[in-house]
Amino acid sequence: MSRPSNELLTWLRNLTQKKGITPAALAQSIDRPRSRVRKVLSGADDMTVDELLLISNTLNLSPDDLGLGEMPTTPLEE
């Protein structure tokens, strides 16, 4: 079964390989166990928003790179 996150995970895996960042180095950088990083990047476990932001920071990705545009600093008005 295809998951909506598959394309994002593939992109992140390819980007880490292109930048020469191993899963072990990524895990150390985001202070998570290597087994957790492997499971998240493989799609075996769901990635938290915090993990996505930590990984993005390690890979020097901006919100625009993630398709999020500019992140608001204040809550949206209703």
Image: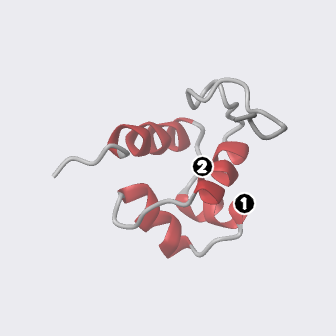
Residue 34 vertical position relative to residue 66 in the rendered view, above or below: below
Contact, mark 2 vs mark 1 (Cβ under 8 Å): yes
Which residue is at the far front? 78
Image coordinates of residue 17 in percent, x first then y, are 50, 42
Q: Name the residue under label 2.
A: 21
The residue closer to the viewer here, 20 or 59, is 59
The residue closer to the viewer here, 71 or 7, is 71
Which residue is at the far right? 74
| Residue 60 occupies quadrant | top right
Q: Mark 1 points at which residue?
A: 29
Q: Which amino acid does label 2 sit on?
A: Ile
Q: Is mark 2 on a helix, strand or loop?
A: loop
Q: 10 Å neighbourhood of mark 2: few (<14), some, or many (≥20)? A: some
Image coordinates of residue 21 in percent, x first then y, are 60, 49
| Residue 33 occupies quadrant | bottom right
Q: What residue type is labelled 1?
A: Ser
Image point 59% across, 51% down: which residue? 52
